[in-house]
Image (tube, coloured by chain):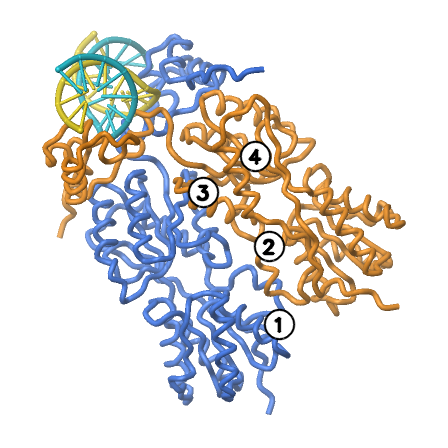
Chain colours: A orange, B blue, C yellow, D cyan
DNA sequence: CTGTTAGCGCCTTCAT
DNA sequence: ATGAAGGCGCTAACAG
C-alpha cells in the first residue's frame, strides 16, 4: 500500500469552520489568555479541534505573538546527572510551573556557548537559562555578553546558573564557602596531608572551590604546597589520570579533595584499580545521584539542585530589575565513609 | 540606569535594506538551499546580518516552510545516562549530522507519551525520535499510534527506539537474545540458583529480557521457579526493595539477573548495605557509564548506544518506505567481577 | 462576546 | 541572478 499524499495538518481555520465560529473565536477558545468566549462556543471549538486532531502550530503562534512560550535551557556537553546535575532540577522546576521546556546542547568549547545562545535567540523563547561555568581567560565572554544583551533587549529574560560575575540575573553556589567548610571538616577529622584534584586553571567554579579549600586549611593551621594542587580537564577521566600522576610522585597524601563528584569518582576508581581504595581519603563536591551506588560512600558538599533551579526560574518570572541580581545557594558538607576519622 | 525600551530584533528586511538588496535575495543568501546569489551580494548580506546581530526567526521560517528543521527527541523521565542511556547517543548522532536538536520530556505515565507527541506535532519538526519502552497492556497505544500517524501524514518522519511492534520505523535491541546469552554465560560460570529482578509485568523490554533469560537457563538444563522472578517498578529503588524481599524469603540464590543496569545497581547496593556484596552474583543489562565506578564491577550485556542512535537517524533521513522497517541491534555479554566463576 | 481586518517574519513562485 | 507579490497559520486591535 502506498503512502497517502501528505495531508496538511488541520489549521485553526478548519476548526473554526467546523465549529461554526470565526478564527478569532476559535483562537480565544483554544489558546487565548482571556476568557471572553461563551461556554457553548468554547465546547464546540474544543470538540471540533479534537475531532480534527488539531494541534496549535506553535511556530505560527510564536510569529504572531512575537515570542515563544516557555524556557530554554542551554547546557554544555551531555545533559546527564553525572556531569550536569543541574539539568534535572531545571526540568522539574519548569514542569512544576507548567511551562514548555526545551533543551539546547552546546559544545564544550567556549565559543560554542555563544553559538548556542544565538541559536536560542532565533527561537525567541521567553526565558533562557544557561547552566555551567566559564573560564576567566575566556576571550569569548564579550561575545556572550553581547548575545545575551541582544536577547534581553529583544524582550527575553536570561538567567545564568554558575556563570557568576556577568551582568545578568544569576544563581550561584557558595563554592568558596563549600570548599572552606570541606577543608575544616577534613582537618577536624584529623587529616593533615592534602592534595586537590582541580579543573583547568581558569575555570571559575573550580578556582573558587580550590581557593576556599586552601583558605580553610590555612585557618586550620595547615599549609598546602602548591605542587599538591593538580590541574587538568574538569572531568572524571582526567581526575583518574591526575591521581596516577600524584601517587607516582610518592608524596605523602592522606586525603584528596576533588572539586566535583565526577572527578572524585575518577579518583576513587583509580585508587581502587591500583589497590585499596581506602588507603587515601577522598571528598567531592555536588552530591550527584550516582554517589548512592559507590563504595566507599563519598564525602561531599551537598547542593540542592532543586533549589538552585527554583531560584533561577523565580528570577526569570519576576519583574525585570534595573540591575542584575545574584542569588547564592549554600551547600553543606556530608561526611560519609570515604573520609573516616583518623585514628592515631 | 533604566532598561532601554525593548527593541525589536533585526528582521530579514533590515538586513536586506542595509545590504542594498531585496528581502528575497537576503533570504537566499542567508538560508536558501539554492546558490543563486552573486558572490558580492552574498558577502554584503552576510556582513549586514552580522553587524545587525541578526538571527533568523526560526518560527517564521518554520511557518513559511511548513516544517521546522531538525530532530526532536522524546524521552520519558530524566534524560540522564542512568535511566536513559539512549539520550547521549541520539544527541551526538544528531550533532554529527549537523541537525538542530531539541529534547522534550514526557512524564512516566503512558498517557504522557501521547501528550508529548502531540506537543511535538505542534512544533512540526522534520524528525521525531521516541526513546523508551512501552507496556503490552497500555491502553493508550491506539492514541499514540494515531498521534504518530497524523504526524507522519503531515510530512514528519517518526522513528521509535525500543517501542517494538508499532507500525513505524523502529530500532530495537536484541533483548531476548541478550537475556538468553546472559543465562548461558552465567550457567557456564557454574551458577545454578537464580533469581530475576524484573520490571512491572507488561513492560516489553523487561519481558523479552526475562523470557530470553529463562529460555537460556532452560537450554542449560536449569529450571527457574516462577517465584524467583520478582516484579516491581523498572528502576533502581524498586530493585533495591525487591532484593530485600527476596532475601528475606531465605531462598537459596547464588545469582541475580536484573533486567537493566540501574536496577542491578540497586541490587548491588542492597547487598552491600546488608553485608558482603559478593555473597550473591549480580548481572545487569545495558552497560551504562555509571558502571565504571562501582565495585564489584558489574557483569552486563553491552549495547552500543551510538549505533542504536545512528541507525535511528539513518532510518529517519532515508527515503520513506512503504512498510515500516525494523532494525535490530545486538549486544554482547561482558563478564566482570560481580559474577566470578563458581568454585566448588 | 464575536467577527473583521491587519499584520507577525519569512520563503517561494513567477516574472524579469 | 534578482525583485515583487502572495501566502504560511496564528493573534491582536478594533468595531460592533
Residue nearest the observer in this picture, A174 or A3: A174
Q: Residue A86 carries which label?
A: none
Sequence-wise first label, 2 or 4 = 4
Give the quarter of the figure containing the C terminus of chain A.
Answer: bottom right
Nearer to me, B206 or B34 = B206
Against A259, is B3 above or below?
A: above
Disc 2: CA contacts within 10 A as few (<14), some (14-19) or many (>=20): many
Q: How far apart are marks 3 and 1 (CA)?
A: 38 Å
Q: Do labels 2 and 1 share a chain?
A: no
Camera-near label (3 vs 1) is: 3
Q: Name the residue beneath numbered marker 3.
A: A94
Q: Position of residue A201 (x, y in %)?
A: 73, 39
Relative depth, front residue between A323 and A176: A323
State which chain disc 3 sits on: A
Q: Mark 2 lies on which chain?
A: A
Q: Mark 4 points at which residue?
A: A160
Where residue B50 sits in the image (x, y, percent)? 48, 18
Query: Of circles 2 and 1, which is in front?
Result: 2
Q: Mark 2 points at which residue?
A: A288
Amino acid at each position: 500500500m502506498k503512502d497517502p499524499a501528505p495531508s496538511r495538518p488541520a489549521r485553526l481555520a478548519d476548526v473554526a469552520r467546523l465549529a461554526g465560529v470565526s478564527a478569532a473565536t476559535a483562537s480565544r477558545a483554544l489558546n487565548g489568555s482571556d476568557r471572553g468566549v461563551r461556554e457553548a462556543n468554547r465546547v464546540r471549538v474544543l470538540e471540533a479541534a479534537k475531532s480534527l486532531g488539531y494541534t496549535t502550530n506553535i511556530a505560527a503562534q510564536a510569529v504572531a505573538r512575537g515570542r515563544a512560550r516557555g524556557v530554554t535551557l542551554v547546557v554544555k556537553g551531555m545533559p546527564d546527572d553525572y556531569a550536569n546535575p543541574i539539568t534535572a532540577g531545571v526540568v522539574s522546576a519548569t514542569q512544576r510551573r507548567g511551562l514548555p521546556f526545551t533543551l539546547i546542547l552546546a559544545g564544550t568549547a567556549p565559543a560554542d556557548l555563544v553559538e548556542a545562545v544565538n541559536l536560542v535567540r532565533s527561537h525567541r523563547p521567553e526565558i533562557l537559562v544557561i547552566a555551567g561555568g566559564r573560564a576567566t581567560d575566556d576571550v569569548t565572554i564579550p561575545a556572550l555578553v553581547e548575545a545575551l544583551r541582544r536577547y534581553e533587549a529583544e524582550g527575553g529574560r536570561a538567567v545564568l546558573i554558575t556563570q557568576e560575575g556577568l551582568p545578568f540575573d544569576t544563581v550561584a553556589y557558595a563554592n568558596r564557602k563549600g570548599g572552606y567548610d570541606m577543608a575544616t571538616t577534613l582537618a577536624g577529622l584529623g587529616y593533615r596531608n592534602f592534595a586537590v584534584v582541580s579543573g583547568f586553571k581558569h575555570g571559575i567554579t573550580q578556582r573558587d572551590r580550590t581557593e576556599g579549600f586552601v583558605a580553610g586549611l590555612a585557618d586550620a593551621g595547615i599549609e598546602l604546597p602548591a605542587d599538591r594542587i593538580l590541574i587538568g580537564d574538569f572531568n572524571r577521566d582526567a581526575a583518574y589520570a591526575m591521581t596516577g600522576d600524584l601517587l607516582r610522585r610518592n608524596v605523602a597524601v592522606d586525603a584528596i579533595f576533588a572539586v566535583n563528584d565526577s572527578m572524585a569518582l575518577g579518583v576513587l576508581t583509580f585508587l581502587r584499580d591500583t589497590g585499596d581504595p581506602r588507603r587515601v581519603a577522598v571528598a567531592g563536591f555536588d552530591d550527584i545521584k550516582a554517589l548512592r551506588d559507590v563504595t566507599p560512600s563519598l564525602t561531599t558538599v551537598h547542593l540542592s539542585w532543586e533549589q538552585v533551579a527554583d531560584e533561577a526560574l523565580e528570577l526569570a518570572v519576576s519583574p525585570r530589575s534595573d540591575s542584575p541580581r545574584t542569588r547564592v545557594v549554600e551547600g553543606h558538607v556530608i561526611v560519609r565513609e570515604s573520609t573516616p576519622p583518623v585514628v592515631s
